[in-house]
């Protein structure tokens, strides 16, 4: 997303911060179950949904390409912390 001028860089930074915050919460709360992990990822998803309004106010949006990039990052985080079950 950083390489596409459609996405304002400061807002992409905010999205990166959401992912970093998710990692911080995983490391501090150490969820033991998939359900506990999903609670944390749901919070991150809601934060991205709120961030979309800011993108839209700047003539951008978290459209398909952006959401796919975010999904890849979330999957990487899940695998990294041992929550890589396929449902």
Image (spheres, rainbow, N blue to C red):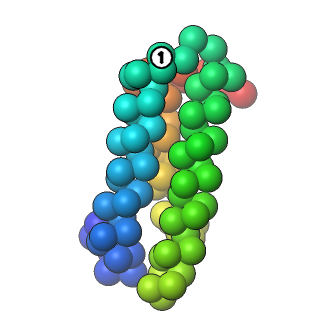
Residue sitting farthest toward the bottom: 59
Position of residue 9 relative to residue 33, above or below, is: below
Residue sitting farthest toward the top: 32
Crowd around label 1: few <14 · some 14–19 · many ≥20 (10 Å): few
Position of residue 53 relative to residue 16, above or below, is: below
**Residue 61 coordinates in the image, percent (x, y):** 53, 76
Q: Which residue is mark 1?
A: 30
- Residue beneath the point at 45% across and 85% down: 58
**Residue 55 coordinates in the image, percent (x, y):** 48, 76
**Residue 14 coordinates in the image, percent (x, y):** 37, 60
Residue 59 as seen in the image, left or right of residue 85: left
Secondary element at tag 1: loop
Pick the residue in front: 61 or 11. Answer: 11
Q: Is residue 47 visible?
A: yes
- Residue beneath the point at 55% across and 54% down: 47
Pick the residue in front: 9 or 21. Answer: 21
**Residue 45 coordinates in the image, percent (x, y):** 59, 49
- Residue beneath the point at 72% across and 27% down: 87
């Amino acid at each position: 997303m950083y390489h596409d001028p459609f996405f304002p860089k400061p807002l992409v930074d905010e999205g990166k911060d959401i992912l970093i915050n998710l990692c911080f919460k995983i490391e501090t709360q150490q969820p033991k179950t998939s359900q506990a992990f999903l609670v944390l990822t749901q919070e991150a998803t809601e934060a991205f949904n709120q961030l979309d309004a800011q993108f839209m106010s700047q003539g951008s949006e978290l459209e398909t390409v952006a959401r796919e990039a975010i999904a890849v990052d979330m999957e990487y985080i899940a695998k990294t912390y041992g929550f890589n079950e396929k449902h």
